[in-house]
Image: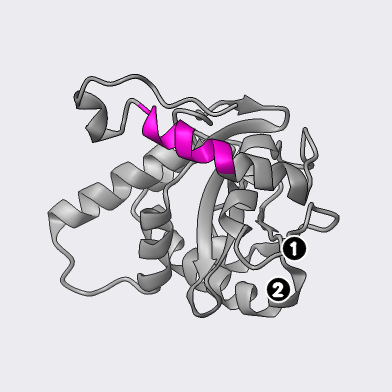
Amino acid sequence: MRGKIPNDDRRHGKIYLENTKMAATFQLKQTEESGIYAQETAQMRTIALNYVKHHMIFLPMSVQKQNHWFLSVVDAKLRCIQVLNSHKPLAANIVQVVRNMVAGLKCYFDHIDADVKKEYSWWIDFKLNIWDIDMVEELPQQDDRTSSGLFVLKYMEHWNGKRLEKGFTQNLIDQFRKKLAAILVNSPLNEENAITRSPLRFS
């Protein structure tokens, strides 16, 4: 969906949209292993340096046991981890998942040299493990059990760092679900597009 929701400047800062795979990687990597290879260290540093060029990092995440998706936003200027969740009863489960992710992400930031960190003044500090976790209130909520991923996409599209630029409802999400199939099929990233055919349209 990066083609649909590109990295851009929002009202309260420049954002970076991460994918679900990296968010899951951070959840698993909660401590720095001894004997880490130099190549992996360099890769971690490169990823972290890409992040610090932005004010916010958007991380789509899931509570696997409940098959529920939510959005975590690492906000450098506010020095907090914002959580945008479409199903409040799962808030307690989400907090621990976010803490695990933050511990892993911090391992990546630890590979940035101190002198380099000074170049990015909007990052007040890099001690993500002591930042507040802010469960954002008054967000559009799902009224079914299958729409959490679609809500995350809309959160990513409209969150500006402090609020949603555009509201939406479950009814809009239901319509979006139908349109999403056409968006994905017609995406230039869809390898099947190599086969000549008319684009799929949905009215």
Quarter-of-image position of residue 91: bottom right
Q: Is residue 56 visible?
A: no
SS at badge 2: helix
Q: Is residue 98 visible?
A: yes
> Which residue ends up furthest to the right in the rendered image?
138
- The answer to whether mark 1 and mark 2 are in CB contact below 8 A is yes
Residue to which mark 1 is pinned: 135
Residue type at numbered disc 2: Ala
Which residue is pictured at 32% across the width and 71% down the height?
Answer: 32
Q: Does the magenta portion include 25?
A: no
Q: Residues within 10 Å of mark 2 (few under 14, many from 20)?
A: some
Identify the magenta region. 178-187
Instruction: Determine which residue is flagged by label 2.
Output: 91
Place of residue 177 in the rendered image (x, y in percent of width and height, measured from the top left): 58, 45
**What's the residue at 80%, 39% (across, down)?**
167
Instruction: Check the image and report above or below for 16 versus 48.
Output: above
The amino acid sitting under disc 1 is Met
Provide residue 4's location: percent of width, then percent of height: 50, 29
Q: Nearer the viewer, residue 40 or 183?
A: 183
Q: In the shown orientation, is residue 115 left or right of residue 78?
A: left
The x, y position of residue 17, in whole percent, is: 49, 40
Compared to residue 28, the image places residue 135 above or below, namely: above
Mark 1 or 2, nearer chain start: 2
Residue 37 lies in quadrant:
bottom left
Which element is circle 1 on? strand
Q: Main secondary structure of the magenta part?
A: helix
Image quadrant containing the C terminus: top right
Depth order, front residue of 116/157 = 157
Taking the spot 52% from the left edge, 66% from the top edge, the residue there is 62
Look at 42% across and 54% down and name the residue there: 20
Q: Nearer the viewer, residue 19 or 179?
A: 179
In the rendered structure, find residue 19 and report the number of the disc placed on it: none
